[in-house]
Image: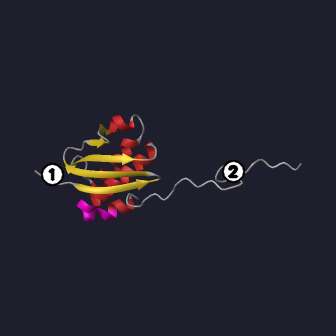
């Protein structure tokens, strides 16, 4: 028996999320755990549900998510991006709503590299005249 699912990949910083949406009751499993248990008390759950609220599909899909890399904030952003992409392939008419909410744009911000002669990306050693 083959179950039909909708697939979407999301990325943010160094986090990559592979999202599968199945017809269901709205449950979310992240790396085999319930999403609330995985993210704890952070505000990530509201962020994960945002694509469903925008497209008015809350409670119609269950999500199975594999996420790797980055921290909790980057992973939550990657999952949100992946869910939005998966919903777009299922509901092409929702493109405008997802676009206006900024859910289809990959967040390009990442850690800036350290430059030689500096202590960090932009912090210079303390200047002394003598």
Residue designated by label 2: 123
Relative height, residue 110 to residue 36 (above, below): below
Residue 98: x and y in percent read 34, 60
Q: 112 or 90: which is nearer to us?
A: 112
Residue 61: x and y in percent read 22, 49
Q: Residue at x 30, y 37 (%)?
A: 33
Residue 19: x and y in percent read 30, 51
Residue designated by label 1: 3
Q: Residue at x 46, y 57 (%)?
A: 107
Q: Is residue 58 left or right of residue 124?
A: left
Tell me how the rendering is colored.
secondary structure
Residue projecting furthest to the left: 1
Q: Is residue 125 left or right of residue 49?
A: right
- The residue range painted magenta reads 89-96
SS label for mark 1: loop
Q: 51 or 115: which is nearer to us?
A: 115
Q: Which mark is residue 114?
A: none
Magenta span: chief secondary structure: helix
Q: Quadrant of residue 36?
A: top left
Q: Residue at x 67, y 53 (%)?
A: 122
Does 104 appear in magenta?
A: no
Q: Residue at x 32, y 42 (%)?
A: 31
Relative height, residue 95 to residue 55 (above, below): below
Does 93 appear in magenta?
A: yes
Residue projecting furthest to the right: 130
- Give the class, few, some or many, for how many residues have Cα within 10 Å of label 2's Cα (few <14, many ≥20): few
Residue 117: x and y in percent read 72, 54
Relative height, residue 95 to residue 31 (above, below): below
């Amino acid at each position: 028996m083959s179950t039909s699912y909708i697939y979407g990949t999301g990325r943010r910083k160094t986090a990559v999320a592979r999202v599968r949406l199945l017809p269901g009751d709205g449950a979310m499993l992240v790396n085999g755990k319930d999403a609330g248990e995985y993210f704890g008390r952070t505000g990530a759950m509201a962020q994960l549900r945002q694509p469903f609220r925008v497209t008015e599909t809350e409670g119609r899909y269950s999500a199975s998510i594999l996420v790797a890399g980055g921290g909790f904030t980057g992973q939550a952003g990657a999952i949100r991006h992946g869910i939005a992409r998966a919903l777009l392939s299922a509901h092409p008419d929702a493109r405008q709503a997802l676009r206006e909410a900024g859910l289809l744009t990959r967040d390009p911000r990442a850690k800036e590299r350290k430059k030689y002669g500096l202590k960090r990306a932009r912090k210079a050693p303390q200047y002394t005249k003598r």
